[in-house]
Amino acid sequence: MFKALVLDQVDGKTVSEIKTLNVSDLPNEDVLIEVDYSSINFKDGLAITGSGKIVHKFPMVPGIDLVGTVLASESSQFSVGEKVIMTGWSVGERFWGGLSQQARMKAEWLVPLPEGMAPKTAMAIGTAGLTAMLCVMALEEGGVTPDKGTVVVSGAAGGVGSVAVALLARLGYEVAAITGREETAPYLKELGAKHILTREEMSESPRPLEKQRWSGAIDTVGDVILSRILAEMDYSGTVAACGLAGGYKLPTTVMPFILRNVRLQGVDSVMCPYERRSQAWQRLQNELPEQLIGEIGQVISLEEVPEYADKIIKGQVQGRTIVDLK
Ligand code: NDP
Protein backbone atom coordinates (compact mmCIF):
# COMPACT_ATOMS: atom_id res chain seq x y z
CA MET A 1 0.00 0.00 0.00
CA PHE A 2 1.29 3.50 -0.81
CA LYS A 3 0.10 7.10 -1.20
CA ALA A 4 -0.49 8.89 -4.51
CA LEU A 5 -2.13 12.10 -5.67
CA VAL A 6 -5.04 11.16 -7.93
CA LEU A 7 -6.87 13.55 -10.28
CA ASP A 8 -10.45 12.97 -11.30
CA GLN A 9 -13.26 14.88 -12.97
CA VAL A 10 -16.34 15.88 -10.95
CA ASP A 11 -19.04 17.90 -12.74
CA GLY A 12 -16.55 18.78 -15.49
CA LYS A 13 -13.97 20.10 -12.98
CA THR A 14 -10.62 18.58 -12.03
CA VAL A 15 -10.35 17.54 -8.38
CA SER A 16 -7.29 16.12 -6.62
CA GLU A 17 -7.15 13.75 -3.66
CA ILE A 18 -4.42 11.80 -1.90
CA LYS A 19 -5.40 8.13 -2.11
CA THR A 20 -3.97 4.88 -0.80
CA LEU A 21 -3.24 2.54 -3.70
CA ASN A 22 -2.00 -1.01 -4.22
CA VAL A 23 0.72 -2.04 -6.67
CA SER A 24 -2.01 -3.84 -8.61
CA ASP A 25 -3.69 -0.43 -9.23
CA LEU A 26 -0.66 0.76 -11.23
CA PRO A 27 -0.53 0.53 -15.03
CA ASN A 28 1.14 -2.57 -16.37
CA GLU A 29 4.56 -1.19 -17.46
CA ASP A 30 7.89 -3.00 -17.22
CA VAL A 31 9.76 -1.22 -14.38
CA LEU A 32 8.31 -0.77 -10.85
CA ILE A 33 9.92 2.15 -9.01
CA GLU A 34 9.91 3.29 -5.40
CA VAL A 35 9.76 7.06 -5.86
CA ASP A 36 12.08 9.20 -3.73
CA TYR A 37 11.13 12.60 -5.13
CA SER A 38 8.96 14.17 -7.80
CA SER A 39 8.66 17.88 -8.62
CA ILE A 40 6.19 20.50 -9.75
CA ASN A 41 6.57 22.03 -13.19
CA PHE A 42 4.31 24.58 -14.89
CA LYS A 43 2.65 21.70 -16.77
CA ASP A 44 1.88 19.90 -13.48
CA GLY A 45 0.28 23.12 -12.27
CA LEU A 46 -1.95 23.19 -15.36
CA ALA A 47 -2.87 19.49 -14.90
CA ILE A 48 -3.58 19.58 -11.15
CA THR A 49 -5.58 22.82 -11.16
CA GLY A 50 -7.36 21.81 -14.37
CA SER A 51 -6.50 25.17 -15.91
CA GLY A 52 -4.93 23.59 -18.99
CA LYS A 53 -6.04 20.60 -21.07
CA ILE A 54 -3.08 18.48 -20.04
CA VAL A 55 -4.65 15.26 -18.76
CA HIS A 56 -5.89 12.95 -21.51
CA LYS A 57 -7.79 10.48 -19.32
CA PHE A 58 -9.02 10.22 -15.72
CA PRO A 59 -8.32 9.02 -13.09
CA MET A 60 -4.74 10.27 -13.49
CA VAL A 61 -1.74 10.31 -11.19
CA PRO A 62 -0.01 13.58 -12.20
CA GLY A 63 3.72 14.32 -12.02
CA ILE A 64 5.86 14.66 -15.16
CA ASP A 65 9.10 13.94 -13.22
CA LEU A 66 10.38 11.35 -10.78
CA VAL A 67 13.56 9.89 -9.34
CA GLY A 68 13.62 6.62 -7.45
CA THR A 69 14.87 3.08 -7.02
CA VAL A 70 13.94 0.09 -9.17
CA LEU A 71 11.89 -2.40 -7.09
CA ALA A 72 11.16 -4.87 -9.91
CA SER A 73 12.09 -4.93 -13.59
CA GLU A 74 11.02 -6.97 -16.59
CA SER A 75 13.58 -5.08 -18.70
CA SER A 76 17.20 -6.13 -19.17
CA GLN A 77 18.14 -2.41 -19.23
CA PHE A 78 17.47 -1.84 -15.50
CA SER A 79 17.99 -4.05 -12.48
CA VAL A 80 16.59 -4.04 -8.95
CA GLY A 81 18.21 -1.41 -6.70
CA GLU A 82 19.29 0.87 -9.57
CA LYS A 83 18.52 4.61 -9.26
CA VAL A 84 16.62 6.06 -12.23
CA ILE A 85 15.21 9.38 -13.45
CA MET A 86 12.09 9.82 -15.56
CA THR A 87 11.05 13.11 -17.15
CA GLY A 88 8.61 13.76 -19.97
CA TRP A 89 7.23 11.17 -22.44
CA SER A 90 3.66 12.41 -21.69
CA VAL A 91 3.85 10.84 -18.22
CA GLY A 92 1.41 12.66 -15.93
CA GLU A 93 -0.60 13.51 -19.06
CA ARG A 94 -1.38 10.21 -20.84
CA PHE A 95 0.34 7.82 -18.42
CA TRP A 96 0.30 7.72 -14.61
CA GLY A 97 3.09 9.89 -13.21
CA GLY A 98 5.50 10.59 -10.40
CA LEU A 99 3.37 12.16 -7.63
CA SER A 100 3.08 8.72 -6.07
CA GLN A 101 5.24 6.69 -3.68
CA GLN A 102 5.38 3.91 -6.28
CA ALA A 103 5.13 4.05 -10.06
CA ARG A 104 5.40 1.69 -13.02
CA MET A 105 7.24 3.07 -16.06
CA LYS A 106 8.39 1.89 -19.50
CA ALA A 107 12.14 1.16 -19.46
CA GLU A 108 12.63 3.38 -22.54
CA TRP A 109 11.46 6.42 -20.57
CA LEU A 110 14.17 6.03 -17.91
CA VAL A 111 17.75 7.28 -17.69
CA PRO A 112 20.17 6.16 -14.97
CA LEU A 113 20.78 8.73 -12.23
CA PRO A 114 24.23 10.17 -13.13
CA GLU A 115 27.05 8.85 -10.94
CA GLY A 116 27.45 11.08 -7.87
CA MET A 117 24.15 12.97 -8.29
CA ALA A 118 21.85 12.94 -5.23
CA PRO A 119 18.20 12.01 -5.98
CA LYS A 120 17.03 15.32 -4.50
CA THR A 121 19.38 17.19 -6.85
CA ALA A 122 17.89 15.32 -9.81
CA MET A 123 14.45 16.68 -8.90
CA ALA A 124 15.76 20.19 -8.16
CA ILE A 125 16.71 19.96 -11.84
CA GLY A 126 13.78 17.90 -13.21
CA THR A 127 12.07 18.62 -16.52
CA ALA A 128 12.67 22.36 -16.04
CA GLY A 129 16.42 21.94 -15.56
CA LEU A 130 16.74 19.42 -18.37
CA THR A 131 14.95 21.89 -20.65
CA ALA A 132 17.29 24.70 -19.55
CA MET A 133 20.28 22.50 -20.43
CA LEU A 134 18.77 21.62 -23.83
CA CYS A 135 18.30 25.36 -24.44
CA VAL A 136 21.96 26.05 -23.56
CA MET A 137 23.00 23.27 -25.96
CA ALA A 138 20.82 24.86 -28.67
CA LEU A 139 22.61 28.20 -28.15
CA GLU A 140 26.01 26.50 -28.35
CA GLU A 141 24.96 24.77 -31.58
CA GLY A 142 23.87 28.17 -32.89
CA GLY A 143 27.40 29.46 -32.32
CA VAL A 144 26.63 31.57 -29.23
CA THR A 145 29.83 31.63 -27.19
CA PRO A 146 30.53 33.71 -24.04
CA ASP A 147 32.73 36.18 -25.97
CA LYS A 148 29.86 37.11 -28.32
CA GLY A 149 27.91 39.25 -25.82
CA THR A 150 25.01 39.09 -23.38
CA VAL A 151 22.46 36.25 -23.26
CA VAL A 152 18.96 37.14 -22.06
CA VAL A 153 16.65 34.75 -20.14
CA SER A 154 12.90 35.38 -19.74
CA GLY A 155 10.74 34.03 -16.89
CA ALA A 156 14.06 34.05 -15.08
CA ALA A 157 12.82 33.40 -11.52
CA GLY A 158 10.78 30.35 -12.61
CA GLY A 159 12.05 26.76 -12.81
CA VAL A 160 13.49 26.70 -16.34
CA GLY A 161 14.64 30.32 -16.03
CA SER A 162 16.50 29.81 -12.74
CA VAL A 163 18.47 26.81 -13.99
CA ALA A 164 19.17 28.58 -17.30
CA VAL A 165 20.57 31.65 -15.50
CA ALA A 166 22.73 29.49 -13.22
CA LEU A 167 24.04 27.32 -16.07
CA LEU A 168 24.83 30.22 -18.40
CA ALA A 169 26.63 32.17 -15.67
CA ARG A 170 28.59 29.06 -14.71
CA LEU A 171 29.63 28.58 -18.36
CA GLY A 172 31.00 32.13 -18.47
CA TYR A 173 28.18 33.97 -20.25
CA GLU A 174 27.07 37.46 -19.22
CA VAL A 175 23.41 36.97 -18.32
CA ALA A 176 20.49 39.40 -18.35
CA ALA A 177 17.39 38.15 -16.50
CA ILE A 178 13.84 39.28 -17.29
CA THR A 179 11.47 39.01 -14.34
CA GLY A 180 8.03 40.27 -13.39
CA ARG A 181 8.95 40.10 -9.71
CA GLU A 182 11.41 42.79 -8.63
CA GLU A 183 11.85 41.09 -5.26
CA THR A 184 13.61 38.14 -6.97
CA ALA A 185 16.54 40.35 -8.08
CA PRO A 186 18.86 39.31 -5.19
CA TYR A 187 18.09 35.63 -5.91
CA LEU A 188 18.78 36.05 -9.64
CA LYS A 189 22.05 37.88 -8.91
CA GLU A 190 23.04 35.05 -6.55
CA LEU A 191 22.47 32.62 -9.46
CA GLY A 192 24.78 34.72 -11.62
CA ALA A 193 22.63 37.28 -13.47
CA LYS A 194 24.52 40.53 -14.19
CA HIS A 195 21.54 42.59 -15.37
CA ILE A 196 17.89 42.55 -14.27
CA LEU A 197 15.19 43.70 -16.70
CA THR A 198 11.54 44.12 -15.79
CA ARG A 199 8.80 42.17 -17.53
CA GLU A 200 7.06 45.50 -18.06
CA GLU A 201 9.88 47.10 -20.07
CA MET A 202 10.18 43.96 -22.22
CA SER A 203 6.41 43.78 -22.81
CA GLU A 204 6.27 46.90 -24.97
CA SER A 205 5.45 45.90 -28.56
CA PRO A 206 8.67 46.16 -30.56
CA ARG A 207 9.30 47.68 -33.97
CA PRO A 208 10.29 45.01 -36.54
CA LEU A 209 13.93 45.67 -35.61
CA GLU A 210 15.21 47.30 -32.44
CA LYS A 211 18.75 48.15 -31.23
CA GLN A 212 20.85 44.97 -31.12
CA ARG A 213 21.38 43.80 -27.52
CA TRP A 214 21.57 40.00 -27.25
CA SER A 215 23.93 37.37 -28.66
CA GLY A 216 21.60 34.63 -27.45
CA ALA A 217 18.32 34.17 -25.62
CA ILE A 218 16.41 31.53 -23.69
CA ASP A 219 12.70 32.29 -23.76
CA THR A 220 10.23 30.54 -21.45
CA VAL A 221 7.29 32.93 -21.84
CA GLY A 222 6.46 33.45 -25.56
CA ASP A 223 4.14 36.19 -26.89
CA VAL A 224 5.27 39.84 -26.98
CA ILE A 225 8.39 39.29 -24.84
CA LEU A 226 9.67 36.73 -27.36
CA SER A 227 8.83 39.10 -30.21
CA ARG A 228 10.80 41.90 -28.47
CA ILE A 229 13.75 39.58 -27.87
CA LEU A 230 13.75 38.61 -31.57
CA ALA A 231 13.73 42.27 -32.63
CA GLU A 232 16.67 42.99 -30.28
CA MET A 233 18.91 40.07 -31.33
CA ASP A 234 22.45 40.69 -32.57
CA TYR A 235 23.33 39.73 -36.13
CA SER A 236 23.48 35.87 -36.28
CA GLY A 237 22.14 35.49 -32.74
CA THR A 238 20.20 32.40 -31.64
CA VAL A 239 17.01 32.25 -29.58
CA ALA A 240 16.03 28.99 -27.86
CA ALA A 241 12.26 29.08 -27.30
CA CYS A 242 10.80 26.49 -24.93
CA GLY A 243 7.81 27.97 -23.09
CA LEU A 244 4.52 29.82 -23.10
CA ALA A 245 4.11 31.07 -19.51
CA GLY A 246 3.07 34.46 -20.94
CA GLY A 247 1.07 33.12 -23.90
CA TYR A 248 1.38 30.86 -26.93
CA LYS A 249 1.19 33.59 -29.61
CA LEU A 250 4.18 35.08 -31.39
CA PRO A 251 3.40 38.51 -32.87
CA THR A 252 6.57 39.02 -34.92
CA THR A 253 7.81 39.81 -38.43
CA VAL A 254 10.32 38.13 -40.74
CA MET A 255 12.75 41.06 -40.32
CA PRO A 256 15.03 39.59 -37.59
CA PHE A 257 15.39 36.41 -39.69
CA ILE A 258 16.00 37.91 -43.11
CA LEU A 259 17.98 41.03 -42.18
CA ARG A 260 19.86 39.89 -39.07
CA ASN A 261 20.31 36.19 -39.77
CA VAL A 262 18.63 35.38 -36.44
CA ARG A 263 17.94 31.73 -35.64
CA LEU A 264 14.81 30.75 -33.68
CA GLN A 265 15.35 27.25 -32.31
CA GLY A 266 12.45 25.41 -30.67
CA VAL A 267 13.34 23.21 -27.71
CA ASP A 268 11.31 20.21 -26.52
CA SER A 269 12.31 18.02 -23.60
CA VAL A 270 9.32 15.65 -23.62
CA MET A 271 10.24 13.53 -26.64
CA CYS A 272 13.97 14.32 -26.55
CA PRO A 273 15.84 11.16 -27.68
CA TYR A 274 17.77 9.05 -25.16
CA GLU A 275 21.29 9.98 -26.32
CA ARG A 276 20.74 13.74 -26.13
CA ARG A 277 18.81 13.40 -22.86
CA SER A 278 21.63 11.39 -21.21
CA GLN A 279 24.21 13.86 -22.51
CA ALA A 280 22.19 16.75 -21.03
CA TRP A 281 21.89 15.02 -17.63
CA GLN A 282 25.62 14.34 -17.59
CA ARG A 283 26.34 17.99 -18.36
CA LEU A 284 23.96 19.09 -15.62
CA GLN A 285 25.88 16.86 -13.22
CA ASN A 286 29.22 18.32 -14.33
CA GLU A 287 28.27 21.96 -14.67
CA LEU A 288 25.69 22.84 -12.01
CA PRO A 289 27.28 23.36 -8.59
CA GLU A 290 25.49 21.77 -5.57
CA GLN A 291 25.39 25.11 -3.78
CA LEU A 292 23.35 26.68 -6.62
CA ILE A 293 21.02 23.68 -6.68
CA GLY A 294 20.42 24.35 -2.98
CA GLU A 295 19.44 27.96 -3.82
CA ILE A 296 17.06 26.87 -6.58
CA GLY A 297 15.14 24.01 -4.93
CA GLN A 298 12.61 24.00 -2.08
CA VAL A 299 11.13 20.76 -0.70
CA ILE A 300 7.41 20.22 -0.01
CA SER A 301 5.24 17.23 0.97
CA LEU A 302 2.68 15.41 -1.20
CA GLU A 303 -0.07 17.06 0.88
CA GLU A 304 1.19 20.53 -0.14
CA VAL A 305 1.15 19.78 -3.88
CA PRO A 306 -2.33 21.23 -4.72
CA GLU A 307 -1.39 24.53 -3.00
CA TYR A 308 1.88 24.77 -4.96
CA ALA A 309 0.18 23.76 -8.22
CA ASP A 310 -2.07 26.77 -7.79
CA LYS A 311 0.90 29.02 -6.93
CA ILE A 312 2.95 27.99 -9.99
CA ILE A 313 0.06 28.89 -12.29
CA LYS A 314 -0.19 32.29 -10.60
CA GLY A 315 3.56 32.85 -11.13
CA GLN A 316 4.21 32.85 -7.37
CA VAL A 317 6.79 30.07 -7.17
CA GLN A 318 10.50 30.88 -7.17
CA GLY A 319 12.90 28.33 -8.66
CA ARG A 320 12.08 24.63 -8.40
CA THR A 321 9.66 22.79 -6.13
CA ILE A 322 10.72 19.28 -5.09
CA VAL A 323 8.13 16.85 -3.68
CA ASP A 324 9.40 14.43 -1.01
CA LEU A 325 7.68 11.05 -1.36
CA LYS A 326 9.84 8.99 0.99
P1 NDP B 1 7.49 28.38 -13.79
O1 NDP B 1 6.10 28.73 -13.45
O2 NDP B 1 8.41 27.86 -12.74
O3 NDP B 1 8.20 29.65 -14.44
C1 NDP B 1 7.56 30.48 -15.38
C2 NDP B 1 8.00 31.91 -15.14
O4 NDP B 1 7.50 32.72 -16.21
C3 NDP B 1 7.42 32.54 -13.87
O5 NDP B 1 8.16 32.24 -12.73
C4 NDP B 1 7.51 34.02 -14.23
O6 NDP B 1 8.87 34.41 -14.06
C5 NDP B 1 7.23 34.02 -15.74
N1 NDP B 1 5.82 34.34 -16.04
C6 NDP B 1 4.72 33.80 -15.48
N2 NDP B 1 3.60 34.34 -16.00
C7 NDP B 1 4.02 35.24 -16.93
C8 NDP B 1 3.34 36.12 -17.81
N3 NDP B 1 2.01 36.20 -17.84
N4 NDP B 1 4.09 36.90 -18.63
C9 NDP B 1 5.43 36.84 -18.62
N5 NDP B 1 6.14 36.01 -17.78
C10 NDP B 1 5.43 35.22 -16.96
O7 NDP B 1 7.40 27.37 -15.00
P2 NDP B 1 8.54 26.41 -15.63
O8 NDP B 1 9.85 27.08 -15.47
O9 NDP B 1 8.32 25.03 -15.14
O10 NDP B 1 8.13 26.45 -17.16
C11 NDP B 1 8.29 27.65 -17.92
C12 NDP B 1 7.65 27.48 -19.28
O11 NDP B 1 8.40 26.51 -20.03
C13 NDP B 1 6.22 26.96 -19.24
O12 NDP B 1 5.47 27.56 -20.28
C14 NDP B 1 6.37 25.48 -19.51
O13 NDP B 1 5.22 24.91 -20.05
C15 NDP B 1 7.54 25.48 -20.47
N6 NDP B 1 8.30 24.24 -20.47
C16 NDP B 1 8.55 23.66 -21.67
C17 NDP B 1 9.28 22.51 -21.76
C18 NDP B 1 9.61 21.95 -23.09
O14 NDP B 1 10.02 20.78 -23.16
N7 NDP B 1 9.50 22.73 -24.15
C19 NDP B 1 9.72 21.81 -20.54
C20 NDP B 1 9.50 22.56 -19.32
C21 NDP B 1 8.77 23.73 -19.30
P3 NDP B 1 9.22 35.80 -13.35
O15 NDP B 1 8.50 35.80 -12.05
O16 NDP B 1 10.69 35.79 -13.23
O17 NDP B 1 8.70 36.85 -14.29
Image: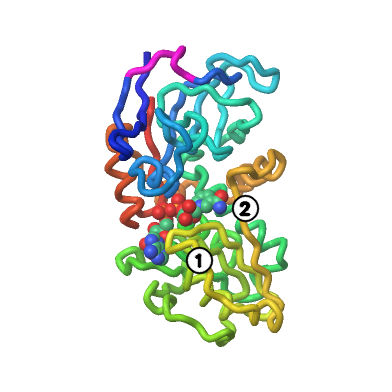
Task: Answer left or right for 292 relative to 85.
Answer: left
Q: Is residue 114 above or below residue 152?
A: above
Q: Earlier in the sequence, mark 2 or mark 1?
A: 2
Return the residue at label 2.
134
Q: Is residue 235 above or below residue 176?
A: below
Picture disc at residue 222: none
Q: Are marks 2 and 1 in contact (CB under 8 Å)?
A: no
Magenta residue check for 24: yes
* Label 2 near ligand 1 (CB < 8 Å): yes
Q: Front-most of 269 and 90?
A: 90
Give neighbour class at mark 2: few <14, some 14-19, many 20+ (Cα, 10 Å): many
Report the residue at 54% width, 63% height from top. 169
**Magenta-highlighted residues:** 20-26
Picture disc at residue 249: 1
Residue 146 placed where, x, y %? 64, 69
Report the residue at 45% width, 21% height from top. 102
Q: CA distance from mark 2 to mark 1?
A: 22 Å
